[in-house]
Image (cartoon, helix red, strand yellow):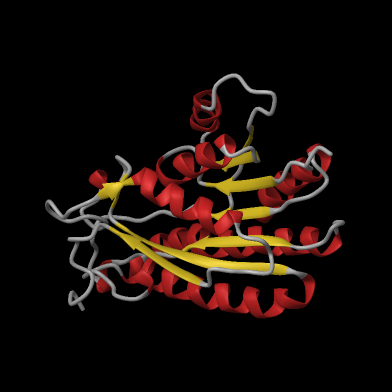
Amino acid sequence: MTETPKIALVTGAGSGIGRAVSLALHGAGWRVVLAGRRAADLEQTASLGGASSHPMLPVSTDVSRPESVEHLFGRIRGEYGRLDLLFNNAGINIPAVPLEDVTFELWNRIVGVNLTGAFLCAQHAVRLMKQQQPRGGRIINNGSISAHAPRPHSAPYTATKHAITGLTRSISLDGREYDIACGQIDIGNANTGLADQSKALVPGQEPKMDVQDVAGAVLYMAGLPLSANVQFMTVMATKMPFIGRG
C-alpha cells in the first residue's frame, strides 16, 4: 500500500535556514510549500529541488499580514487539503541598535514578522490540523539562542524570540487534545550567508556551523511520530560563545 505523502509548510523558505530545511524535507519525500516575501527567491529554492514527481509549491507571502497568510493557507487547502508540518521560520533582524534609538516603526516591523507572523501561521495551521482526517500535525518554531541569552543592543529581536518560547509552550498545551505537537529549535550561528550581513547576528569572527546540520536537526524533529515530541532543541556551533556569554 502506498503511503500518503506528508505536507509541510516552510516560511522564510527563500534563503538560509528556510531553504536548507525545505530541500531536506523535499529530499525525504515531503510535499513542501514554500512561503516568503520574494517570489524569485522561492522559485530558486524550488528549482534547487531538481526535477521531481512532487515539485515544491512557492507561494509569495508576507506573514505579518493576515490577508496574505489567509491566501497562503487557501492555497494549501486547495492543493493538498491538509498540513502535517509547519516550520515557523520567517524572521528578520537588524544591526545592533541601542534600545533608546529603536524607532516605533522598526519595533513594529520586527514584531510583525517574528512574532505576529509566527502566530498567524500557527493559528491557521492549528485550525486545519484540528479539522483534517487523520487529524493532528506538528509545528516547529524557530526560536534562537537569543530566546535564552541576548546579545547587546538587540531588544526587539530578543523580545520576539523570548515570546516565541511562550507561543511554543501555549501551542503544545492547547494542541495536546487534538494530536498537535509543537516544539522549538533554538539555532546559534548557522553559516547561511545571511548571518554575515549583520553583526547583530554573528559579530566578528564567531565560529559557525554548516546550515545542513540545522536542516538535519529539523528533519529529525519533523520525522517523529505524533506520539513523541522534541519540546526544545538547541543546535549551535560548538565553539560559539553561548554558555557563559550572559
Q: Quadrant of residue 162?
A: bottom left
Is residue 48 depicted above or below 106 in this figure? above
Counting from the top left corner in percent of width and height, residue 232 is at 47, 71
**In this picture, residue 90 sits left or right of residue 70:** left
**Residue found at x 18% / y 77%:** 244
**Residue found at x 38% / y 72%:** 147
Residue at the far front in the pictured view: 1
Counting from the top left corner in percent of width and height, residue 43 is at 55, 27
Residues 68 and 121: in front is 121
Instruction: Count the numbered circles shown.
Output: 0
**Residue found at x 32% / y 71%:** 155
Counting from the top left corner in percent of width and height, residue 105 is at 42, 61
Q: Quadrant of residue 206?
A: bottom left
Observer able to see residue 89:
no
Observer able to see residue 146:
yes
Residue at the far top in the pictured view: 51
**Residue found at x 22% / y 55%:** 202
In the picture, which quadrant includes the C terminus? bottom left
